[in-house]
Image: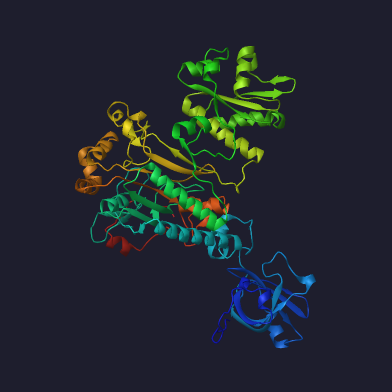
Amino acid sequence: MSESIYGLKRTHMCTELSARNIGEKVTVMGWVHKSRNLGGVIFVSLRDRTGLLQVTFYSEQDEELFKKAETLKSEFVIAVVGTVAGRTPENINPKMKTGEIEVIGEELRVLNSAETPPIYIEEDLDANEAIRLKYRYLDLRRPDMQRNLLLRHRVAKIARDYFDEQGFVEIETPMLTKSTPEGARDYLVPSRVHPGKFYALPQSPQLFKQLLMVSGYDRYFQIAKCFRDEDLRADRQPEFTQIDIEMSFVDVDDVLTVNEGFIKRVFKEALGVDVETPFVRMSYKEAMERYGSDKPDIRFGLELVNLSDIAENCGFKVFSDAVKSGGSVRAINAKGCGAKFSRREIDSLADVVKTYRAKGLAWIAVEENGLKSPITKFLSEDEVKAILERMKAEPGDLICFVADRNDIVCTSLGQLRLEIARRLNILDNKVFKFLWVTEFPLFEYDEEEKRWVAMHHPFTSPMDEDIPKLDTNPGEVRAKAYDIILNGVELGGGSIRIHSQELQSKMFSLIGFTKEQAWERFGFLLEAFKYGTPPHGGMAYGLDRLIMLMAGASSIRDVIAFPKVQNASCLMTNAPDYVDEKQLEELHINIKTEVES
């Protein structure tokens, strides 16, 4: 049974109380975290959003009140009136924010009782995630989860304050819009009043924010909900949140500078971390050649080194054939790993590169008294010497080689350097290393569809000097695009946009749209471009990913209040679910295929 709180008003949150409140009469409310009955005294740890507070009941002070306190169990919701008292020196708990004080209970009301919860309400809970998500409302009571969501709140507020100060206007864009499929699948919403027609939930506010630039708002931002019907992983959800911005009359430097200011501000105010600006800038080509990734983790070295010139005419045919066929030979020097890794561990590294289509891994372990390797017998003394010099090899080092097509070599070694870093335990989540990756290719070739597709999206502007290549060699055209990377994770990305109707139409043509298809899908944008469009550009952050990294979480599910699981379902509400036949009739939908239950 619950009791009314009529006549009681909470005066303090739990951790708002401290030694300066000693002697004050207070009213606190929350959940029973733990209760310990020591005979004549009961210690209750009371928990609210701010933390824990000890409430103490004495039998000699009020026997009836003491008996009532004896009924308390974990997760009961209670209100307590009492007086703040200082703890004796031997009872001070330095691990608690309120460890110097306690509240001596004088009145107790049980506002709601609780059954034994299916999960423990405790820090760093080691429990099956499916159970946590089924009872998410309980999981969210845990202190670490509450810290994550409070951090999210602070970051969102800082974003609004910062962009407001920079002259941005927050404008909401539609959630029900036109399906313009190019990239991920849309979530579709059937229209009741337009039979057979569908809205789409926005994959991003991209077209609307460009139209807002046409509309003259100059600087727009929005904390926007977005939807993509794609396969999930740790950093993906079917619905996610972006910090979305767009600016008129800007170039790449303008956009990057404003956003560096935002990152510096948010890390300082939310975490107390000073971020050094300006960030490192690196072209896509350089990132792939040095780190084997377009989102390189630069917290550590292990950079890729090109050995193709040394390997081209060497006696090891795996190397020489790869170079002569247009590929390359590259290597990384895993400093100290030749001495640390066993032969079995070295062999297991080959499995890593094979996952990324490399045929195998060659290696040389540098020892005090010579070299250990299965490939040195195929190489001349001069070739080995040249390799060791370029790799800056020292005793104890392990040099790992991959020879193949350039894309396979870079990607597989890029993943190998990450795996070696994990094995060496050199990835520090409290170190934040940012960089911009710029000048992405404008297009990538889709082998399955046999056509060029936009690497980012079809509204990205090409580099001015590369525009002539659109007709001759689209694969060499670079984009005015940029991604912001933190510790090997893409936090967001953007570009300077195409603002010419002629160039936009050409872009649509190059990715395989007929003139009719382009106008059918994007006619409203092309029409708007007739009426004076300013040069503009912007970007969007994945808010969920940003909070995940700031919180040191391993998945964005830990920073979203009610996330979906791998198959895009909600274990708590059982969404998606079947609907009544009447609802389907109103939407003019007939389910023809039998759905397995």
Q: What x and y, as percent, mark residue 426?
A: 64, 41
Seen in the picture, residue 371 relative to 169 is either above or below; the reply is above
The residue most toward the right is: 90
- Using residue 100 as the reference point, say whether residue 246 is left or right of it: left
- Using residue 185 as the reference point, say whether residue 124 is left or right of it: right
Q: What x and y, as percent, mark residue 404?
A: 50, 23
- Using residue 379 as the reference point, say whether residue 89 is left or right of it: right
User: In the depicted view, which residue is nearer to us: 531 or 594?
Assistant: 531
Q: Quadrant of residue 143?
A: bottom right
User: In the depicted view, which residue is nearer to us: 442 or 170?
Assistant: 170
Seen in the picture, residue 252 relative to 163 is either above or below; the reply is above
Q: Is residue 201 visible?
A: no
Q: Residue at x 70, y 64 (%)?
A: 95
- Total residue callouts: 0
Q: Quadrant of the C terminus?
A: bottom left
Snapshot colouring: rainbow
Q: Is residue 184 visible?
A: yes
Q: What x and y, as percent, mark residue 256?
A: 42, 45
Q: Residue at x 75, y 70 (%)?
A: 92
